[in-house]
Amino acid sequence: KASQSSDFYRNVYSVPEDANVIVMVGSLKQKKNPRTLLEALSLFDKHELDTYRPHAVYAGGGPREGELKHFVGTNGWSEYVTFLGVVPNDKVCEIMCMADIYLIASDFEGTSVSLLEAMFNAKPIVASDVPGLRSMIESGRNGLLYEVSSAAELKKCLMELLSDADKARKLGMSARDSYNARYDYVKMIEAYKEILG
C-alpha cells in the first residue's frame, strides 16, 4: 500500500487532482494495446470530457511510447494524458493510489501482477476479454471486460464507471474480495505447502 494520499501522488507526478485517472501499468508494446485507451478517449465528446474529466496515465516505457506521444501531441491531447516512463516496482503502489480506474488492454496475459496490485488496492478494473484476464475478472462482478482492441467498447466500459461512482466503488471492493479469496499471499503459501507435502 502507498504511504500517502492520492492527491499527494498526483502532485508528485503532475497529474490533475480533479481528473478521473485511468491507469495502465506495463510495457508500451503492441501486445499490450496501449493505443486503445487513446482511441477510446478520442470518442469522448466535449461535454463528456468536461463532465467526466478522464485522464490517462501510462506507467511504463517501450517501443510504442514515441508513437503514443506523437498521437497525443498531434491531436492536442496533452491535458488528458500523462506519460511517466518506466516506474520502479516499489513505486507502482503510488501509481495505483492515484488511479480511479485500472485498465489492462492486452492481447493475452497470464496472471498479471499489475492486475493483482489493482485488485489488492480495490480499484475498479476494466480488462480486455482474453483468456488470462477472463480467468481473473468476471464482468459485472469484480470488473468489466470489453472486446480486445475495441475503442468503442472500452469507452462504453469507462463511461459506465465514470458515470456511476457507486458502481465503480462496489466493483473495486469486489475485486479486493476476489484477491483475498484467491491470491492472498499467506493462503498461497499454505496451498503450496499442502501441494508439496
Image: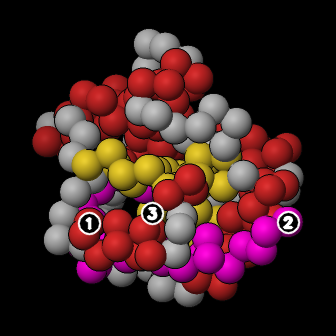
Q: Residue 108's spot in the image, x, y percent?
A: 33, 77
**Residue type at numbered disc 2:** His
Res 109 quadrant in image:
bottom left
Q: Quadrant of the C terminus?
A: top left
Residue indicated by mark 2: 47
**Sequence-wise, which precedes: disc 3 or disc 2?**
2
Nearest to N terminus: mark 1 or mark 3? 1
Left or right side of 108 for 129: right
- Circles 1 and 3: CB distance less than 8 Å? no
| Span colored in magenta | 24-47
Residue 23 in the magenta stretch? The answer is no
The residue drawn where x is 58% and y is 23% is: 7
| Residue for point 21% across, 46% down | 86
Query: Residue 104's mark?
Result: 3
- From the top left corner, tell me how far across and down residue 141 is, in percent: 71, 58
**Of the pair 126 and 95, the residue shown nearer to us:** 95
Q: Residue 41: in sight, yes or no?
A: yes
Q: Earlier in the sequence, mark 2 or mark 1?
A: 2
Secondary element type, mark 1: helix
Q: Which mark is residue 65?
A: 1
Amino acid under disc 3: Ile
Q: Is residue 186 left or right of residue 87?
A: right
* Residue 48 percent coordinates (x, y): 81, 65
